[in-house]
Image: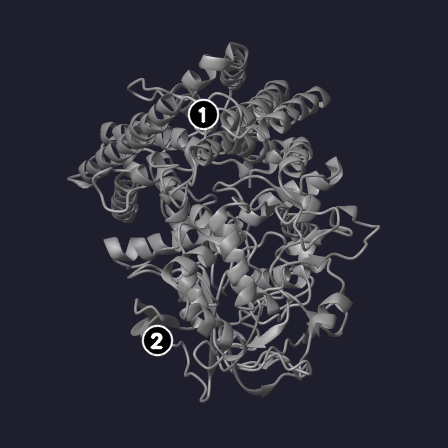
Amino acid sequence: MKNTYTKVLAVSTLMLFAACNDDNENGSSVDVTLNTAVLDDFSAAIAQATYNDLAAKTTTLYSQVLELAKDGATNTELDACRATWKSARQAWEQSESFLFGPVSTDNIDPRIDTWPVNFTDLDAQLNSDNEFTEAYIDDLEDALKGFHPIEYLIFGENGAKTAEQLSARDIEYLKGLALNLKSLTSDLDESWDPSSSGNYHTIFTTAGSGNSIYPTQAAAFEELVIAMAGICDEVANGKIGEVYAAQDPTLEESPFAKNSITDFTNNIKGVQNVYLGKYAADGRGLEDMVRAYNLGLDNDVKLKMSTAIEALGKITVPFGEAIKTQKTQVQNAIDAIKALQATLEEELLPFVKLHSN
Amino acid sequence: MRVGRIIKHACIVVGALITVYACVDPDTDNPGSYNEWLSGGSQTIFDNGAGAFSTAFPSMTEAHEAVHEAGDVAFEQTFVTVPSPVNPGLGPIFNNVSCTSCHINDGRGKPPVGAEQITSLLIRVSIAGEDSHGGPNPAPGFGVQLQQRSVYGKTAEAQVKITYVEKSYTFGDGESYSLRFPTYELQNPYTSLPPGLMVSPRIAPPVFGLGLLQAVAESDIVALADADDKNDDGISGKPNYVWNVLEGKRTLGRFGWKANNPTILQQSAGAYNEDMGITNFVFERETSWDQPQYDGLSDEYEVSDSLLHSVEFYIRTLAVPARRAADNVAVLAGKQIFADAKCGACHVPRLRTATDVAFREVSNQVIYPYTDLLLHDMGPDLADNRPDFDANGQEWRTSPLWGIGLTRIVNGHQNFLHDGRARTLIEAIMWHGGEAAHSKDYVRSLSRSDRDALVKFIESL
């Protein structure tokens, strides 16, 4: 890691020479038009697009759960729920590369994605006579609602639950949970919608024009890069690293759907989305800023992202197993994600600070 | 959170230090080799985003970084009901399920809006008199803190209903402002509330920079005290001496809204115990002990000594964000107003940490926390009327102001003071009373642009 220290020091020293320039705070060229477009497109093509997709998928999930509840659950209906759960999960995990704004400050993240599940209380709920109304579910502890309790109910402890094994109470609870997830993700979708009041789109895209949260565009770019690095940190050190170090499969998130590796991969794909400015539609991203000045850095970021995704792809068994049987692959994935994180923090972050106002 | 950012900071800080020193005139008050941009001395970081309060000290050894990371993971750990393979031990009665669910992004909590659940505000309770250590006298059936949630099958101690009454005031220039006066009503108590129950709401405070505050020499804090106002400036400043569980005696309190906790370790251990129902080597008993809901199980400690120590270390090593725009014209004007209004009599800008050969990261640092860590009478409107060791019902500890301007980006709100009643910084100022009444009156008399400048200065901290 010593060489990266030197690089950062070099950039910082450049900042020393740049910093006293009167014309421009950074003393380096800034393309305000492009930068504004990148922030606009982040909001439209990434944040709004991802949250919109997430909300649409949880809406589908809710309607599929209602089907499941109608005149006897079938395995086909249950499979449909599982497939949609996974695709909603994909949108959510990709959105974790930008965990700032309402998802964090409005406390939405813990309400839809708390791990572990409180199984003791969940069983007690299922064995009770409580009516799982919308308000009742909304009032429950975070560890009793959101993605993971739904996962537990539709996949079962070993991922092999059949429609027959779904009890009436399971289905009642599932209905409440799916509705709650749909409504929280709709709130999230709305929180970036330019037409809703107090939306974060306006706050983020007006960075640098009298905005008290983002006094400069540089602050908005820092937010983006730090969030990208933050999810790399979380995946490498937390989601993978903690479980791997403890060699304890019970610590694994998403164990019932055996979806953990997919989750991690989607986290890194989320980083890629922000960098490229591309989710469904391709907008302008950080990529466009970087390419204007530093093709080497652009190549490096892209290489590190694809290397990390490939390294995760080499883990071929469920994560809980892989920590025991595919240690090399797991360690390689951790290293690749940490390398990406280092590039984001030590090179991309100083870069966006230099090339924004 | 975002622990991996640790590594880059060593270099960023060096570079930024050079940058800052190169271009900014040294503070004329500060002829030494330090700089008020660097709020946390050498443990200042340059993240202005949502992670501004969540970044580790920039210059730690790898071994220390590893402990910080372990503490970070533990800080985010969600506890669940026993039995469970993962993180068992929640409750049976509690306020929240993890450290981070109150201290979101290591930052400041807020009171609920509308029908929201209460998540980051808790209620301390007691009855008249003192416990055997001179602290609050536990309320029979409730202890010293109200747990408003419970695991399945147990009953929350009570629900809290907050109602606000708006009162209108005017600034000297005729512009009006409004303050909301809260009342706290305890509903559906699981057993009858004792007569004369005293209630003190407390919001979850930010947890960064505490290692530096802990490193300030006790003698330096006590030297700022003037309990009898011998210098006749209207400002007293009183140390709180509180029960130190591990030392078995009363020592100087530094943390908590009433300086009612002596150390980060005891504060963290107390939060595990009271807020989450997690027993530990500092607080060995469930909070329901001696109450009808106690399950009689003599559990093992629900958080291990090593994890508790790592959480303590995590909090102790959260760095302080650097100031932003400290040389902006309006900010500098606001700085002058801050001085003219004598805000700095309690919100003391600069402190120096003691020499600590065992932990050089916090050793001998000039820091800018804007607090004296002492108690001051804040007047009847802010009073909780619940004594806490030497703090009487009108006294509160001066809150640090460093990083306060980043509350919006980190926590998405502008709720300040001990129960989050203030909705803007200017409201928070206008709530000041008691010893701070003169300062408040001074601010009230200012023009709009001067008030804005003062707020800009505070936001730059």
Q: Residue A286: where, in percent of width, then height? A: 43, 21
Horizontal side, residue B427 vs residue A164: left or right: right
* Residue highlighted by disc 1: A271
Q: Quadrant of residue B73?
A: top right
State the mark number for residue B187. Answer: 2
Return the chain for callout 2. Answer: B
A156 above or below B275? above
Q: Quadrant of residue B296?
A: bottom right
Quadrant where the C terminus of chain A lies? top left
Q: Residue B455: where, in percent of width, then height? A: 45, 57
Closest to the camera, between mark 2 and mark 1, is 1
Q: Residue B234: where, in percent of width, then height? A: 59, 80
Q: Residue B95: where, in percent of width, then height? A: 47, 63
Q: Residue furthest left?
A: A71
Front-most of residues A253 and A71 = A253
Q: Please, what secondary structure does the residue beneath circle 1 have?
A: helix
Query: Residue placed at 56% from the left, 44% from the top?
Result: B54
